[in-house]
Image: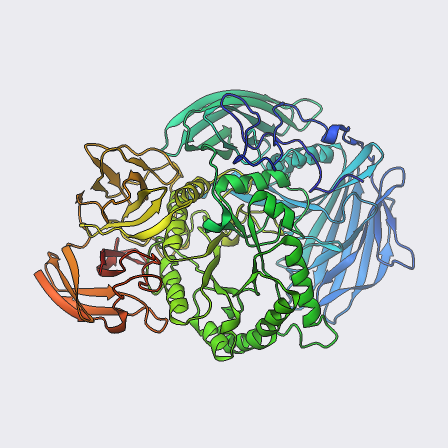
Amino acid sequence: MPPSPHSRSLHRRAFLAGAGATGVAAVGGLAALRALSDSSDEPDAPDGNSSPTAVDPGDLQLITGDASHPGRVTVATADGRELVHFDGYLIPGTVGTGAATTTSPDASSVNISYEASAEGWAMSVAYRATGGTVTADWEFHAPEDADLSNGRTLRTLVDAAADVETHVPATRWTRNPRGGVPYLERVTENHFVDWVSGDSRISGVITVTGSGNNDAYGINTPPTRGDDGVWRASVNFRADLIVAEARDLLEAARPMLAGAVLGHPDLPEQLVDVRGPSTYNIFADAGTRTFTVGIAGMPVNSTAEVVARDYDGVEVHRSTVEVTVPEDARHGDATVDIDLPDERNWYCLDVSCGDAFARTTAAVWPEYEYGPADGSIVGLGGFSAIQPGARAGALELDDDEQALWHRLGIRHLRNPWLTADQSSDHGIRTGIQPSGSAGKFSDPDAESFDDWAGSALAKGSEAGVELFELLNEWNTDKEKKTEHATEYTDKWLKPFRTAMDRDGTEAALISQGLAGWDPGFLNVIRERGGWELLDGIAVHPGRGNYTADYDSQTWNFLGQVRKARAYLDGHPGPTQLWLTEVYACTQPNSWWNDAARTAADAVFLTLPLAKASGVTGVHWYQLNDGLWFDRFGMNPDNSEYYYGLFHVDRSPKPAAVAFAHAAEVLDGASFLGWIESPHPDLRGLRFSRDGETLWVLWSRQDGYITNADHTDDGFYPFPEPWEVPDTASLQVGVPDGVRCTDVIGREVPVDNGSVTVTGSPVVITGLPEDAPTGPEVVDGDMSVALTGVSVRRDGTSLVVDGDNSTGGTLALYITGRQVDGEVPTKEIEIPEGGFSESVDLGDAMPPEEGGEGASTLGVNPGQPPQVRVHAGKSSKLTPESAQTQVWRAEYYRSV
């Protein structure tokens, strides 16, 4: 038996590479991480041993079951070695195959008719063996309202090298004819499995179109309904040397080429693929890197064109490369050296050959030594290559992923993927989220609460967790929210706290992650005496096509976080605010989600906004595209597949580079307050770090709604990642000697004492400790002509002065501190021209001494509290737009 996928040492190129060559590079100075190096261009044998040699099993044969297994068909090799039993079909909870009538017209054919376990059903299958392939064609006669989508072909692997198959879809790159960015589409589903005997192996694959998953008992086999009302599905089993070739490509982290080697009618005759020199294509230095271009198809010589661009679309490489598919293989490779010239940048590499094309990405940024975890809010959630229950056959080794955590500044994990010792070695703090559903303990014969809690506490102890996040998103059922909150408090929260105390754990306990901000759920917890048992709350502040700093009543980030912070400040007891699922979804060409550059801006801005809001920790959801049970999967019609910082091939999105830069900017930083700008469209945050002040600046001249010109059609063509949008900008005066960087950490030029600021944030570092609260000179067009805004106290009233040059009356909104856990906003009307208006804020007036809870706008102990003054307008960008754009004149002022 081969080693498990989590202990194997398969060939991978270096995780990081130095300039000019593929090689070893230190990761964050952490000696605990082994060197992830392999500078050879040829695969090395695992652990110095020879890999099992692939053998051809010969023509496959079919063996029908005896009386003990009616309806079973066994696939065997030419010399009689049994590989897999097929045992019928099951739709869980609905119907399955029963008694069978089997006929065999010849040695390579088996027909079976089954009695179904429910009335109104009939099931049959015809097996055919041809060479190294067996095809099973299923037919189902079912009631008209039947749901067969979760149907499963039952099969048992005989002495295979793994309990379940490695599920990897066959894919190809494509484009929507209406435009937008290219994307991967699924063609069919391949479930790979090996049989190992001594130093030889047989490689097999089960192919089912539309198959979503597999387990130890069966493979999802969803049929489609024909015009004649009959449902049909096909299962293909194949074992030959071509499958072995595909399996080797999969092990070399080249799943698309693996699928192409197997072939499919919907794949091109020649499919091109490109792979970088390392697992994640993250490099610590500029330099030349070697990429591999592969072509699958018939033996032929082909010419592929290679183009590489940086984040601004600058073409850094263009060449052609000749690729030969040998006579004795189904794929061939060629290498191309590409210079990645900048010390910090993101690159996109496109390869085309005829009508086929492929894409991968790479990024360069220097190493960085992060401070201790207890000073960081930066964390990670979602699925991992090393999480329990993850499917075998990862593209990455465990050490690769752990090294990547450090490169990204990850200091917290939502899941117990590490042991306590590993967490300590890596300087990472770990949490755990015990899972459970409503009504779980109502069955006296099922698992008891004590057993469930004991298991959760034992897992927490093994992982050395510092945080228990008790359950997840029970508030999604609006009709049963009160019922679920009551059960949660009485039957889960209270006894779990008792169990924690009895166990003696010092870990914190926070509420289940709320799907969006939901005070109603927490109100029930408070009313039923569960509030004081919590150390904090967890929120999943979902975000649609809005900038990260949009603060409104809709599905936005900052608005939800501010409300959660105000709720905690207004209801003494728990203090910690955890955002355990935060994201920037990049589902391709979907108006509700983010294009690549939009996501990079949102990712970067989300972290400092969270820091400013007094968030204890942010768990980014998630590292890679795909799902935990479909780890190499993609589905352009399903947003769940596109929440990663990295693409499904593990190459970086611009968001990954922006995430790392934000983590570096915030490392050791303390929030001071919001920028106090003279311009209505300049936004910004101020932080203190290492005796200096830094500013994070951005403009909202173009509004808060992304993709605002979308129509009612769900399709929205995204720009390519390197296409810099033509947007409005501000010229912001900055002192001499400062350093300005963009969202991915590149230098931004200072011209005549000013820096250009757009909707994409700019970081200004090197400001003195006593720097002013904002830039004094800001030039540029105004979205809402409200200027000269200042505020002063008058008892519990706030006097607001300014100039309204909009040509009409404006509604002005003032936000101060929380009142009884809510975020009150006072409204006044201001006339055209100069004005001085007073508004009674009452308890919403921040206390003069400041400190925690003094302002809903940010948690900045020791700094003067602030109020926000804003006025807005909205209109459609085009008559066809399905949504209005929102602009605001917005000011933050100390009081």
**Hey, which quadrant is residue 434 in on the image?**
bottom right
Say whether residue 492 is left or right of residue 133.
left
Say whether residue 248 is left or right of residue 370.
right
* Percent of width and height locating residue 738: 28, 35
Q: Residue at x 67, y 71 (%)?
A: 449
* Percent of width and height locating residue 230: 67, 60
Location of the N terminus by quadrant is top right
Q: Is residue 376 visible?
A: no
Location of the C terminus by quadrant is bottom left
Position above or below: 800 against 370: below
**Along the viewing direction, whichever of 643 and 671 lies nearer the viewer:** 671
**Along the viewing direction, whichever of 539 and 876 lies nearer the viewer:** 539
Say whether residue 489 is left or right of residue 721.
right
Position above or below: 647 against 563: above
Position above or below: 842 against 697: below
Q: How many marks overall?
A: 0
Q: Residue at x 70, y 50 (%)?
A: 234
**Hey, which quadrant is residue 884 in on the image?**
bottom left
Position above or below: 290 against 433: above
* Percent of width and height locating residue 629: 63, 52
Say whether residue 708 is left or right of residue 399.
left
Q: Is residue 582 visible?
A: yes
Give the residue at the far right of this rendering: 67
Q: How is the image coloured?
A: rainbow
* Percent of width and height locating residue 280: 54, 36
**Along the viewing direction, whichever of 564 and 335 lies nearer the viewer:** 564
